[in-house]
Amino acid sequence: MQKNIPIVTIDLNLNQFAEVGKSFPAHELPIWIAGFGAENVRVSGKTEETHTIEDMDQEISRMLFAHGERKLQEVFGSSYRDGIEVSINRILEKERAANGSENTAESKNRTSAETGV
C-alpha cells in the first residue's frame, strides 16, 4: 500500500553563529532531534510535497543508507523496522485527523482513545 508522508522543514541550530534549513520526511524528525538535541531543532513547517513509500523494505534500506543502522537502533529501538512503521502510521493518523477525514466524535464514556506517554 502506497503511503504519502509529509515532508517537514526545520531550522537546525549548529552553533550560535550558524543555522541551516533542512527538509526531510516527517518520520525522520526523531533522528534529527536525537542527533542535535531538541533545543537545536525547530520545525518551521511542511512542504506541499510528500515522500511516497511504496515498499517498506525499500524505505528501510533508504534510511539505513542515509543514517546507518546504529542511529536507527538508537532512535527507534533494536527492532527499528517496527519503530519506523509505528512512527509512519502515527504521522498518517495525525494527517488524516488534521485533514478532517477521521471521525472525531467523542466516545460514549467521554474518554479519549489516545493516551499520553
Image (tube, rainbow, N blue to C red):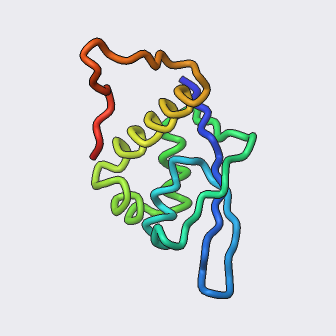
Which one is nearer the viewer's eye here, 92 or 77?
Answer: 92
Question: Which residue does the image show at 56% across and 48% down from the upper left?
Answer: 26
Question: Which residue does the image show at 28% across and 54% down from the upper left?
Answer: 78
Which one is nearer the viewer's eye here, 38 or 74?
Answer: 38
Question: Which residue does the image show at 57% across and 18% down from the upper left?
Answer: 101
Image vertical order of residue 8 relative to residue 70, above or below: above
The count of marks equals 0
Q: Give percent across and percent down for residue 93.
A: 48, 30
Q: Give percent across and percent down for residue 83.
A: 36, 45
Which one is nearer the viewer's eye here, 66 or 47?
Answer: 47
Residue at the limit of the structure toward the right, as seen here: 48
Residue at the limit of the structure toward the top, as seen here: 108
Question: Which residue does the image show at 53% across and 43% down from the upper left?
Answer: 59
Image vertical order of residue 108 relative to residue 91, above or below: above
Q: Give percent across and percent down for residue 21.
A: 70, 66
Q: Quadrant of residue 19?
A: bottom right
Judge from the rendering whether residue 16 lies leftward or rightward of residue 64; answer left or right: right
Which one is nearer the viewer's eye here, 112 or 2?
Answer: 112
Image vertical order of residue 39 relative to residue 29, above or below: below
Judge from the rendering whether residue 32 lies leftward or rightward of residue 105; answer left or right: right
Residue at the limit of the structure toward the front, as seen here: 110
Image vertical order of residue 101 relative to residue 72, above or below: above
Q: Give percent across and percent down for residue 62.
A: 55, 51
